[in-house]
Amino acid sequence: MRRFGWLLGLGPVIGAAPVSAQISARWPIHSRDRPQPSVVTPAPADRPAAPPADAIVLFDGTGLSQWEGDSGQAAPWKVESGYVEIAAGSGEIRTKRGFGDCQLHLEWMAPAPPHGEGQDRGNSGVFLMGRYEVQVLDSYDNRTYPDGQAAALYGQYPPLVNASRPPGQWQSYDIVFRRPRFDPQGRPLHPARVTVFHNGVLVQDNVMLSGPTAHQRRPPYAAHPDQLPIHLQDHGSPVRYRNIWIRELSDS
């Protein structure tokens, strides 16, 4: 298999996978001058998407037995009325088991009425393998840097459109994730790829990540296990989650 030299700072590699058209060298990371994605009104929220027969249910509204705190302790977030709410300042939670290639479904709600603006409004995040973030943010009538708004792959790709519902309404993410591949020496062979539907609207189309998520920088890949936990971020806002399930996908 060919290495993706463009991610290693070696420039494009002939015959390698094409660089996604969504990324742009024109705009600095987290630029507030970058054009905002156009707004698309999603379908009305009606009922949760039921997990398919081969799904692993990670949260069904009754408890956090599949999760733990960031130090391995019992998950400290609050469960009530069929959802789990971030206990601000308690730290992130993560799945007890690891996952690699997967289809992940979850639903989330930003607080209403909204508080703060930009990155300080309804902020959380879904970290695939604990490293690669799909941003959670109240992006309804809330301007921030495009690569940090709801459904962005934080610091790398803004969503194709802003499909956010108002705060206080349930929103859904359906994420297809393909983990990065490394050779036996730990050198990267293929980047992680991510597809995201936000409220049923395609917002990330099989994009290739340059490396793990970071704030105001883009670190390179570092070799890691093929399966790692999924993390939900505590960013100090009482965001709620419900109906979380995952399907493991075969290697491709």
Image (spheres, grey):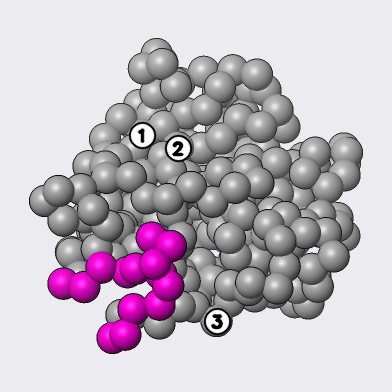
**Magenta segment: does it hold 12?**
yes
Q: Which residue is mark 3?
A: 21
Vertical side of 157 occupied by 223: above or below = above
Q: Is 7 or 116 nearer to us in this picture? A: 7
Dot 3 falls on a residue whose secondary structure is loop
Q: Which residue is mark 2?
A: 231
Type of the residue with mark 2: His
* Numbered circle sitting on residue 95: 1
Q: Residue 250 placed where, x, y %?
A: 18, 64
Q: Residue 225 placed where, x, y %?
A: 22, 42
Give the residue furthest to the bottom: 15
Vertical side of 29 occupied by 217: above or below = above
> Of the residues under marks 1 and 3, which one precedes in the sequence?
3
Is any atom of residue 208 visible in this view? yes
Going by the image, does 170 lie left or right of 208?
Answer: right
Going by the image, does 250 lie left or right of 71?
Answer: left
Q: Where are the magenta residues, as a range?
A: 1-15
Q: Residue at x 40, y 56 (%)?
A: 104
**Magenta segment: does it hold 49?**
no
- Quarter of image, res 72: top left
